[in-house]
Amino acid sequence: MNRTILVVDDSPTVVKFVTLSLKNKGFTVVAACDGMDALEKMSNLSNSVDLIITDLNMPNLDGYGLIEAVRQNKQLDETPIIILSSEEEEEDRQRGIEVGASSYLVKPFKPKLLLTEVSKYL
């Protein structure tokens, strides 16, 4: 079964790198440049998203706001969410988990570590 992963980051370089890593493992990837874009793309998809990978610091709607919005949506509230952020302080990690993230990875990261996290949830 083909699984769909939503990658949300305002850095085109990060989106490209993560997308390539995931597509090489057979996943379908939908990219969004911020939280608002992600919510819009999720509402327009015919199939549901199986996993979300999001940055925290983005314009329009940050990662925390995106996670809160996803957790309030009854159709998406069980969707695993991996935060992929350059914020490495314990407070950031704690807040991410408190708002509903499943996992927290710090940039820079190794693709193998990301794929290991993804495989935990899919």
Image (spheres, helix red, strand yellow):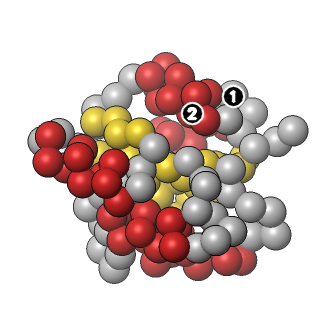
CB within 8 Å, label 2 to label 1 = yes
Where residue 72 appears, as percent x and y from the top left, is 51, 73
Circle 1: residue type: Lys
Front-most of 116 and 9? Answer: 116
Q: Residues within 10 Å of mark 1 (few under 14, many from 20)?
A: few
Identify which residue is drawn at 49% across, 20% down: 112
Q: Which mark is residue 60?
A: none
| Among the 4 quarters of the image, the one containing residue 118 | top right
Question: Looking at numbered disc 2 in the image, what kind of residue is underneath it?
Answer: Val
Q: Which quadrant of the structure image shows residue 88? A: top left
Q: Nearer the viewer, residue 1 or 97?
A: 97
Q: Secondary structure at mark 1?
A: loop
Tell me the quarter of the image containing the C terminus.
top right
The residue at the far right in this view is 1
**In the displayed structure image, the side of residue 6 where residue 58 appears, left or right:** left
Residue 13 in view here: no
Against 109, residue 15 (above or below) is: below
- Whichever of labels 2 and 1 marks the residue nearer the N terminus, that label is 1
Q: State the mark number for residue 118.
A: 2
- Residue situated in front as seen by the camera: 39 or 19: 39
At 68% across and 50% down in the image, what residue appears?
A: 50
Q: Residue 117 location in percent, x, y?
A: 50, 29
Residue at the disc numbered 1? 25
* Residue 103 seen in render: yes
Residue 69 vs 19, above or below: the answer is below
Q: CA–CA distance between discs 2 and 1?
A: 11 Å
The total of numbered circles placed on residues is 2
> Is 42 displayed left or right of 70 in the figure?
right
Vertically, is 26 above or below 56? above
